[in-house]
Amino acid sequence: MHISCAHCGLQRICFPKSLSSTEIAQLDQIVSSHPAVPRSSQLFNAGDAADFLYALKSGVVKLSRFDQAGNEIIHAFYLPGDVLGMEALESPVYPFDAIALDNCTFCRIHRDDLESLAQKIPTLNRQILSMMAQELRLEREHFDQLLNKTAEERVAAFVLSISNRFHTRGLDSTSFRLPILHREVATYLGLTPETFSRVLNRFQTHGWLSWRRKQVDILDAEALQALAEGCAQPECHYRARKRG
Amino acid sequence: MHISCAHCGLQRICFPKSLSSTEIAQLDQIVSSHPAVPRSSQLFNAGDAADFLYALKSGVVKLSRFDQAGNEIIHAFYLPGDVLGMEALESPVYPFDAIALDNCTFCRIHRDDLESLAQKIPTLNRQILSMMAQELRLEREHFDQLLNKTAEERVAAFVLSISNRFHTRGLDSTSFRLPILHREVATYLGLTPETFSRVLNRFQTHGWLSWRRKQVDILDAEALQALAEGCAQPECHYRARKRG
DNA sequence: CGTCTCCTTGACGTTCATCAAGTATTGTGG
DNA sequence: CCACAATACTTGATGAACGTCAAGGAGACG
């Protein structure tokens, strides 16, 4: 049975974020539980009928697809409280695969139910739009992390970005377990595993970061921040070109 | 005075896309005209209060900002019929600059008016979500065009993408004027003007494309398509790595 | 304990950014 | 309408960052 959103620890991040208690009660009517998805299984695949939105309760999910050349493209990692499937509001099918990187649990909402309810509750309507806009913002952030950035800048920005998301969820933002393979992080950042490995090695040497297997420890957030923002560091020979 | 959406040539692309004639009449009530914006001027800047959504009637607009290092990042080019400002539905201010690349004309809608009307018209509500989702899809397409792609693949994909958008608008999709500087296209694609110039030169040599100043002529769409998809071409020594 | 997958480390080559200089085109004022 | 300036684009030489290939090591799982 579904636990009421009113008692869920993720209500500050998830759907109920801006709703009143009576509105949350209405939301509860259309929220149901979804069978747990084990590690490496898909929640849905590209091309599946997009009937539901999913709220991630626990675990981590990657949103990905394979391009014509057979390379994996990873567009997003979802953490507890995030909502999956927003992009399908444009089309009848999901455009991407959603794959559990850990054992995952979900709430789910039928999109027709959500649409009907949103038509009655303006706050919910605004909330949906806001979540959609956030998805767009995150994608553009991801884009910015890659464009004209060196491998070191990308990794630094990624670590800080994940750290912030842990912080938002009230978790330890300097030491945490991240159930994502290095290979997948590299793919997300448009790098090869080899390059990613070398960057981690350099960060460790400088005492900025320890990231062994799935355990991440941020040792010098300021150094990483400076690097992510493209400020000069002795090791970074490559400089972004200046504005004309 | 505002021309009714019912008589606008862009209604198949713009807001009225999926609305009935009575609904379009209601929409007309909240749509107003906006003073023309001359070339190189901004429609709005990052940080401005985001009170309005704008529908581009004529001209081309770029959505951009400057990063910490002072480099321009261009996230999108808008063509007639496109709607600007969707991303601001999450925040009270625009997160980007919108700059006219040509003399531009706009319709505009106050976001509060739109929200109220959408609460009454479910079709409009769905339409707004769909436009938002499309914005997200285009951004991800943009992302895919850059990730692990060579300069040639990026340019080929860009030309075809623009061509498709002209086609959607019922315009000539093989020969058209594109009022975007080469430098701006290069920036959009994460390249330098030099590299962009060299790619155009190669395409011209092969007889695939002629792009002089602002006049674009696609001479061999299939060759460009093959290149954009990463299929082998004699000139392209770089091959995408295969899926593991 | 053995196998599989993940990660690491090294040597090398390619693509593209950078620097620099030159040519074409647009815009402006006389 | 022409001269000049400013901007946009082109072309060439050079080097750096990172992808590729190859092989070895370490952790996970049965």
Image: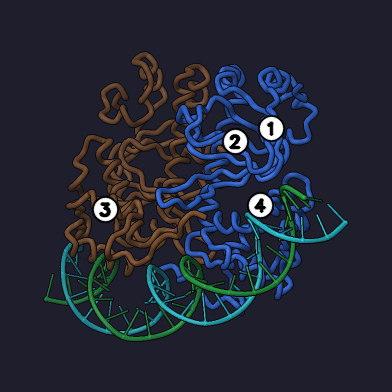
Chain colours: A brown, B blue, C green, D cyan
For label 2, the residue is B84
Q: Residue at x 55, y 54 (%)?
A: B188
Q: Position of residue A85 (x, y in %)?
A: 46, 40
Residues marked 2 and 1 touching at CB (< 8 Å)? yes
Tell me the number on the disc at residue A224.
3
Q: CA distance from mark 2 to mark 1?
A: 10 Å
Q: Amino acid at mark 2?
A: Leu
- The one nearer the camera, A159 or A104, is A159
Label whose residue precedes the other's in the sequence (4 or 1): 1
**Residue A77, placed above or below residue B190:** above
**Residue B193, placed above or below residue B70:** below
The chain that hosts pointer 3 is A
Number of other residues with Cα within 10 Å of mark 2, as a class: few under 14, some 14 to 19, many 20 or more: many
Q: Residue at x 24, y 53 (%)?
A: A223
Number of other residues with Cα within 10 Å of mark 1, as a class: few under 14, some 14 to 19, many 20 or more: many
Residues marked 3 and 2 touching at CB (< 8 Å)? no
Q: CA distance from mark 3 to mark 2?
A: 34 Å
For label 1, the residue is B106
Does residue C21 appear to the left or right of A210 in the view shown?
A: right
The chain that hosts pointer 1 is B
